[in-house]
């Protein structure tokens, strides 16, 4: 899934980079496959935990 934009209150964040943290109440504009959307929905609702990968050199 690609996040195209985030609506946060009255503010829009377009083409967010990896430093942007999602917050409760954010509205996402996304593009991707139906499977990707379903997985994003599971992450967003807490049904599935986001995977944690070890950092390089660890």
Image: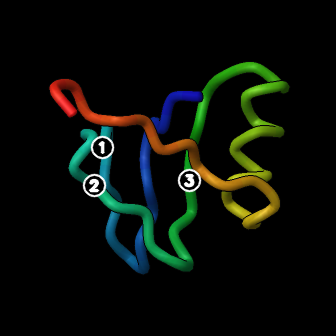
Looking at the rendered image, the disc whose residue lies closer to the viewer, 1 or 2, is 2
How packed is label 3: few (under 14 Cα within 10 Å), some, or many (20 or more)?
some
- Residues at circles 1 and 3 in contact by the CB criterion of under 8 Å: no
- Residues at circles 1 and 2 in contact by the CB criterion of under 8 Å: yes
Work out whether 57 lies above or below 5.
above
Q: Spatial distance from mark 1 to mark 3, Cα to Cα?
A: 11 Å
Secondary structure at numbered mark 1? loop
Q: Spatial distance from mark 2 to mark 3, Cα to Cα?
A: 12 Å
Residue drawn at point x = 83 percent, y = 25 percent: 35
Kindly identify which numbered label has been placed on residue 24.
Answer: none
The mark nearer the N terminus, 1 or 3, is 1
> Which quadrant does the C terminus fall into?
top left
Kindly identify which numbered label has been placed on residue 16.
Answer: 1
Q: Quadrant of residue 32?
A: top right
How packed is label 1: few (under 14 Cα within 10 Å), some, or many (20 or more)?
some
Work out whether 12 lies above or below 24.
above
Q: Is residue 15 left or right of residue 45?
A: left
Secondary structure at numbered mark 3? strand
Q: Quadrant of residue 12?
A: bottom left
Work out whether 36 lies above or below 28.
above
Work out whether 46 lies above or below 19.
below
Pinpoint residue 40: horizontal percent, then vertical percent. Answer: 69, 44
Q: Spatial distance from mark 1 to mark 2, Cα to Cα?
A: 6 Å
**Residue beneath disc 3:** 28
Q: Is residue 32 left or right of residue 7?
A: right
Pinpoint residue 11: horizontal percent, then vertical percent. Answer: 32, 70
**Residue beneath disc 2:** 20
How packed is label 2: few (under 14 Cα within 10 Å), some, or many (20 or more)?
few
């Amino acid at each position: 899934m690609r996040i195209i934009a985030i609506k946060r209150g009255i503010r829009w964040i377009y083409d967010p980079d990896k430093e942007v943290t999602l917050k409760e109440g954010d509205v996402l504009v996304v593009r991707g496959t139906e499977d990707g959307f379903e997985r994003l929905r599971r992450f967003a609702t807490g049904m599935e935990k986001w995977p944690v990968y070890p950092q390089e050199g660890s």
